[in-house]
Image (cartoon, rainbow, N blue to C red):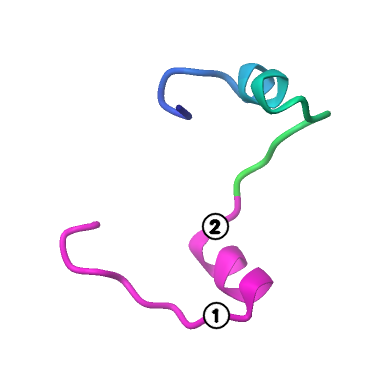
């Protein structure tokens, strides 16, 4: 979806005020998870 739609369009679809993207490091920190790259994803 992010490839073909703007942030504003995605926010409208989700009925959200705004949307933003996290870096991989930000996602790991926010979820308390462990950074792990699965084969074939990068």
Identify the secondary structure beneath mark 1.
Answer: loop
Identify the secondary structure beneath mark 2.
Answer: loop
CA–CA distance between discs 1 and 2? 14 Å
Q: Quadrant of residue 18?
A: top right
Q: For mark 1, what is the residue?
A: 33
Prevailing secondary structure class for the magenta stretch in the rendered image = loop
What range of the chain is rendered magenta? Answer: 22-42
Q: For mark 2, what is the residue?
A: 23
Q: Residues within 10 Å of mark 2 (few under 14, many from 20)?
A: few
Q: Residue at x 63, y 80 (%)?
A: 32
Residue 39 picture location, percent across and down: 18, 68
Residue 39 magenta-drawn?
Answer: yes
Front residue of 15/36: it is: 15
Q: Residues within 10 Å of mark 1 (few under 14, many from 20)?
A: few
Among numbered discs 1 and 2, the one appearing first in the sequence: 2
- Do the residues under discs 1 and 2 have CB atoms within 8 angstroms? no
Query: Of discs 1 and 2, which sits in the foreground?
Result: 1
Q: Residue at x 83, y 29 (%)?
A: 17
Front residue of 15/31: it is: 15
């Amino acid at each position: 979806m992010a490839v073909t739609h703007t942030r504003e369009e995605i926010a409208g679809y989700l009925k959200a005020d705004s949307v933003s993207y996290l870096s991989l490091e930000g996602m790991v920190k926010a979820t308390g998870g462990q950074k792990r790259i699965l084969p074939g994803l990068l």
